[in-house]
Image (cartoon, helix red, strand yellow):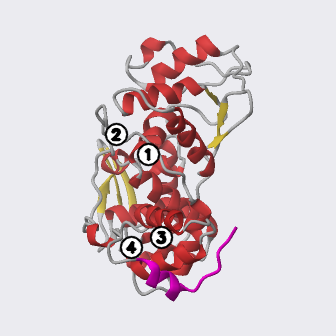
Amino acid sequence: MIQLKASTSTHLRAAVPDEAFPSHSFGAIYARIVRTESNHKYPNRSVSRSINDVAKSLTRNEATLFSEQQPVDEIAPTTPAMPILRGAGAKKTISDLHLPEAVIAVKESINCRDLKELQSLLVCRLGQNSQETRLRYARFIIRWFFADGLDGIAQKTWIAYQDDRILTDILRYQYLAHENVMGACVAECLFPIEIGMKVPASLFDRFLSSHYAGEHTRKTSQRLKSNLMRLGILARHAREDDELLDLNPCKTSILLLTHNLFARNEPRTIELRNLLANPFWMYLGIKHEDQVRAIFREADAAGCIGKYVVADQLEQITTCFSLGTFLDKKVRL
């Protein structure tokens, strides 16, 4: 992949011509936008209630996520999660991300018996005045961060490591993997752009028009950028273009998700091309495939994986643990 390089201009320009990218790619779109806009400046109470009271107030007719849960595949697909173009008339809104509340939810989930109890706890703990709003937010948190169940990868990570940085990496992955438009934005729209570069607002507008196969609302664009900021991906500046930030993920997070996605039940040998085809490493904030390779080489040398092999046309890693053993041993890199 051709990388976009920074120039000395305030609005960083692409150092490659449009022809270097496919005409439909966001790399090409970014290159054109930055050249045409490089000199342009853009104008710019908490409710205390018992869990039992809350649980009783949730009527039987209120729909929950639990009856709709689908079984989670044992092994993640080895192809990238491509965006689904949504036709005209489809709902084109993005909900606000609640990352700090998700961190609290994971830590509190250890004391819950099931997702229904966790939902009641969240409705009790969230600070919005309206119970309907608290219930809606609780459902979003469960949908995004507990899609694999109460004792899924988020809870397992916290129990094993008690490390907020690693937990945040895993929650970022969970959110982007389960909120399609946000994941597509990170893996396709922002991935070709180098860290520190300016991101014109019109790039997001073009992305959303492409993703939704038509027009989108201003509120959708605003929430897209606000959620990217909450994830630590974007820095927003008044009357200036936004800036792409370095997430600096933990190396342990890369290994943890590799085991969760590809070696959940037993040690596995994984072709690197299949591993790289899954965008989980992009969601964590890694910008180049060689960075992933370097992490696996270091993990091999440290004994965190079985081996990393490059021979002729073969490039693969072999894990030496299942996910459960990896967590039990609290493997760190």
Q: Give the distance between the C-alpha atoms of the residues marked 3 and 1, in whole angstroms.
A: 18 Å
Would you name the residue on which mark 4 appears?
Answer: 323
**Horizontal side, residue 122 vs residue 259: left or right:** right
Would you name the residue on which mark 2 appears?
Answer: 83
**Element at badge 1?**
helix
Q: Earlier in the sequence, mark 1 or mark 4?
A: 1
Q: Is residue 15 visible?
A: no
Q: Give the distance between the C-alpha atoms of the residues marked 3 and 4, in whole angstroms.
A: 13 Å
Instruction: Give the amino acid type for the residue marked by disc 3 in the picture.
Output: Ala
Would you name the residue on which mark 3 appears?
Answer: 154
Residue 185: x, y in percent? 46, 38
Note whether 79 is above or below 161 in the view shown: above
Residue 44: x, y in percent? 72, 26
Instruction: Give the amino acid type for the residue marked by disc 2 in the picture.
Output: Pro
Q: Is residue 46 magenta?
A: yes
Q: From which residue to which does the magenta span run?
A: 45-58
Q: Give the distance between the C-alpha atoms of the residues marked 1 and 4, in whole angstroms.
A: 24 Å
> Which quadrant: the C terminus?
bottom right
Q: Earlier in the sequence, mark 3 or mark 4?
A: 3
Local crowd at mark 3 within 10 Å, few (<14), some, or many (≥20)?
Answer: many
Q: Earlier in the sequence, mark 2 or mark 3?
A: 2
